[in-house]
Image (cartoon, grey):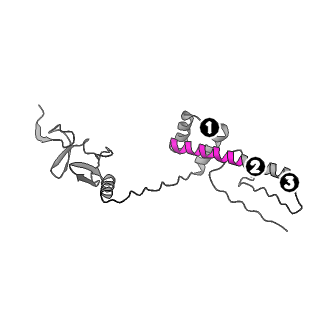
Amino acid sequence: MIRQFGAKCSSCQRSIHSTDWVRRARNFVYHLACFACDQCKRQLSTGEEFALQDCRLLCKQHYIELIEGECGQQKTKTKRIRTTFADEQLAVLQTHFQIDSNPDGADLERIATITGLSKRVTQVWFQNSRARQKKYQGSKKNRTNHSSNSGRSSTDLCITPKSPSGDSVDEMIFPTSVLTRFSFTLAW
């Protein structure tokens, strides 16, 4: 027979047995699994800062949000950190873009696993790349139409920048996610 303490869990209100792991906060006792933020339901760890607000457990983040809301301060949305891609990740993404510029969900999941990125980041990279490709193809078409419609004068100069691999930008069949500097010298 398992002996019971007289205490009940402050969260679930079930009895606490002598064999149960517990956490204490002031005069409240919780089952280990019940010691979680009331807002996000995330289990709180040993040593982690938390607050007790009206008998509710809150993680530090949700307590701060609650206090700021009560003080009439507006929540300032934290700026998302810009994703940077490693060369290896870009190589995988660009290779797959050459094969299929609009992969389905399963392919996105597989590519995300290969690159170590989230499926959402991978999906957004493909969306942005398709938009860049469309924009580039539109601007290339406009340049072609413009140059064929207007006569070139002897002072017109056409410079085709080169990518780091030596290919002209016009020959690149996929957009890149990194800014590449092009340098060239004009001789007059």
> Whole-percent x and y of residue 144?
80, 49
Q: Which mark is residue 102?
A: 1
**Under tag 2, what secondary structure?**
helix
Q: CA distance from mark 1 to mark 2?
A: 22 Å
Q: Position of residue 86 (x, y in %)?
A: 57, 51
Q: Distance of mark 3 from mark 2, alpha carbons? A: 15 Å
Give the residue at x 17% y 46%.
29
**Which mark lies nearer to you, 3 or 2?**
3
- Residue ID at (56%, 39%): 111
Extreme residue in the bottom direction: 188
Mark carried by residue 140: 2
The amino acid at mark 3 is Ser
Whole-Å distance between the Cαs marked 3 and 1?
A: 36 Å
- Residue type highlighted by circle 1: Asn
- Based on the picture, tell me whether residue 7 belongs to the magenta stretch: no
Amino acid at the residue labelled 2? Lys
Marks 3 and 2, the one that precedes in the sequence: 2
Q: Are marks 3 and 1 in contact (CB under 8 Å)?
A: no
Is 59 rendered above or below residue 5? below
Q: Residue furthest right?
A: 154
Q: Residues within 10 Å of mark 3 (few under 14, many from 20)?
A: few
N-terminal-most mark, 1 or 2: 1
Question: What are the residue bounds of the magenta stretch?
Answer: 118-136
CB within 8 Å, label 1 to label 2? no
Residue 116 visible to an observer of this rendering:
no
78 left or right of 34 in image: right
Helix, strand or loop at label 1? It is loop
User: 178 and 135: which one is in front?
Assistant: 135
Mark 1 or mark 3, which is nearer the start of the sequence? 1
Q: Nearer the viewer, mark 1 or mark 2?
A: 2
Q: Which residue is mark 3?
A: 150
